[in-house]
Image (cartoon, rainbow, N blue to C red):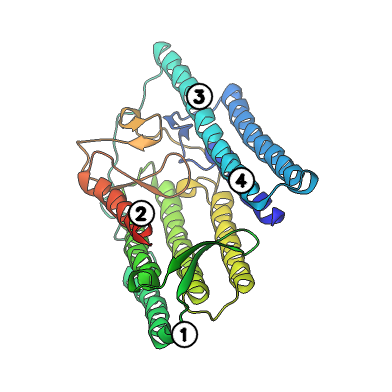
Amino acid sequence: MIWIISALLLFLGFSMAMTPYITQRGIIFGVTLSKETDEIIQLKKRYFNQNMLLSIVMILLFIYFDKGLNLSEEKLSIIMVVFISLQMVFGIVAYFIANRQVACYKNKLIEEGYKPNQKMVLDLNYRETMTIFPTGLLVSIQLIIIAIEIIITIKNQAIIPDKIIMQWDFQGNPTRIVDKTWFNIYSLPIIQLVMVFILSFTNESYKRGKQRVMNKQSVKWSQSFRKISSYIGVVIAILAQIMMFSIQMTSVVPFLTEKTMSKIVFILLGLMFLTIISLMVIYGQSGSRLNPSSVTPQAYDDDKYWKWGMFYFNREDPSFWVEKRMGIGMTINLANWKAVAFVVIPIVFILGVSFFIS
């Protein structure tokens, strides 16, 4: 389905292009700088245009490959993976280049007398005065969906075919079929249970994550951003679990046809993309777009702990979660082994489950 691939490439390109416009206030391409010059404004526009242009060119090429050359589904799938990888690599590399340019510009300002702000402001009441979607309720909703899925699977185990379809192409044709075993039947619910842990813990991060405080107004923006991020994260979590439920009802319990399942999956993915784009455009990272015309005070300068303006590594900071500089949401302190384990262990587990599906 060409329109689905086009929408995916457009979403990815737009997400990368919006990076310099959704960062925290006082952060420019991962560098702490309180004032934007015309040169930096042009740099941001150029980054946006380059990413969007690449996305549009790849969409046109994909349409040509599909309609003009009539390539096979297998070849189109390979091209899609290449295009998505190219969009991501280009966006990241272009970001690193812009990050170096802004860093050099900042160093030049320091040589001319500019003094970065080394004063840190602590708000001890930040967590107590903000609200997020109750994590316990989020866990319960996800577990209910998974419980219904498991009950249906158990009750209909007798009609489960000897061969289970685990993967389809864009036309709904099966591309991976495995034998009917206990592990293969319940592998998807097992992965969903891991997702419950990840998604629920991520929701809690909006309340417990480290926050850059500049003034009372920035606290209000941040709290509003984190609250809406929590609720949007809940919507995405539920949609993701429903999507996995639909796949289980198609591949294992043959209740849904491949076409019906494909429509459900595409609709759910579309809703996820729309919610993320809405958060980006309306709020920006840490509420930076709520009132972009307001004066932004100089933020605390901790650039030395941000590698390439993207990865936070600070052994002196016990924080587990910190707000991203690039993109929307939270990231981890890579110097905190617990945070690294939180990311690595679930990924290894899911990959292990996928590997042992025979």
Q: Earlier in the sequence, mark 3 or mark 2?
A: 3
Q: Amino acid at mark 3?
A: Ile
| Crowding at mark 1 (Cα within 10 Å: few <14, some 14-19, many 20+) | few
| Residue that mark 1 sits on | 159
Q: Position of residue 250 (x, y in %)?
A: 53, 74
Please name the residue that numbered disc 4 is placed on: 80
Residue 97: assigned label: 3
Instruction: Where is residue 350? Give x, y as percent.
Output: 35, 57
Crowding around mark 2 (Cα neighbors within 10 Å: few <14, some 14 to 19, many 20+) is few
In this view, the mark in front (2 or 1): 1
Q: Which mark is first along the chain, 1 or 4? A: 4
The secondary element bearing badge 1 is classed as: helix
Helix, strand or loop status at disc 4: helix
Residue type (three-letter) at the residue carrying disc 2 = Leu
Any part of residue 339 in sight: yes
Q: Quadrant of residue 302?
A: top left
Gap between marks 2 and 1, in whole Å?
28 Å
